[in-house]
Amino acid sequence: MTCNIQVLMQKHTLKSDFDWGSLTWFAGRPLGNSNDMTIGCCILKPGQANPRHYHPNCSEILIVMQGRIEHTGPGAGTVMLSVGDTVTIPANVWHHATNIGETEAILFIAFSSADRQTVGE
């Protein structure tokens, strides 16, 4: 399974690469195509984790499209997620994901704000 990058990667996307993987944004106010939400795709390299962070102005929904991850956040603690699993993260909740598989983990992510804010450690 893929995140249909070939179809979704149009001239109106924003991509950021990191040591742990990448974030690609398809919709949001910075792209000029949404006043209500931010939509993107996170790719986590095998054995890598994104930094612990929270979103002060929005909730997040994360859907695993490929791979297996551990998702860590307060309340639920650490949960294992695989293809098709979904997690909802309220605003102001510290969290992060770790790829526990041997291939890239692809995560579809949606935020309840067109101007997603992130605060990290």
Image: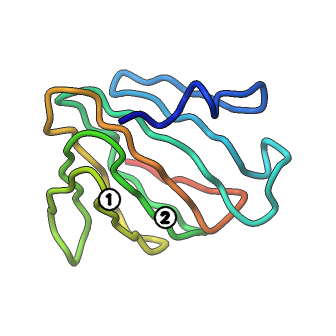
Q: Judging from the image, what secondary structure is the residue with disc 1 in?
A: loop
Camera-side residue of 6 and 41: 6
Q: Is residue 55 left or right of residue 70?
A: right
Of tags 2 and 1, the one toward the viewer is: 2
Which residue corresponds to mark 1?
95
Q: Is residue 98 left or right of residue 33?
A: left
- What's the residue at 17%, 30% (across, down)? 47
Residue 110's quadrant in the figure?
A: bottom right
Circle nearer the N terminus (2, 1): 2
The three-letter amino acid code for the residue at tag 1 is: His
The answer to whether the residues at label 2 and label 1 have Cβ atoms under 8 Å apart is no
Residue 30's quadrant in the figure?
A: top right
Q: Judging from the image, what secondary structure is the residue with disc 2 in?
A: strand
The three-letter amino acid code for the residue at tag 2 is: Glu
Residue 57's quadrant in the figure?
A: bottom right
Outermost residue to the bottom: 75
- What's the residue at 36%, 21% (across, down)? 19
* C-alpha span from label 2 to label 1: 11 Å
Q: What number of labels is visible? A: 2
Instruction: Please tell me how crowded label 2 is: few (under 14), some (14-19), or many (20+) other residues with Cα within 10 Å.
Output: many
Which residue corresponds to mark 2?
60
Tell me where residue 44 appears, x and y as whole percent: 33, 33
Scheme of colours in the image: rainbow
- What's the residue at 32%, 59% (across, down)? 95
Instruction: Please tell me how crowded label 1 is: few (under 14), some (14-19), or many (20+) other residues with Cα within 10 Å.
Output: some
Instruction: Assign the N terminus to one quadrant of the image.
Output: top left
Tell me where residue 36 appears, x and y as whole percent: 75, 66
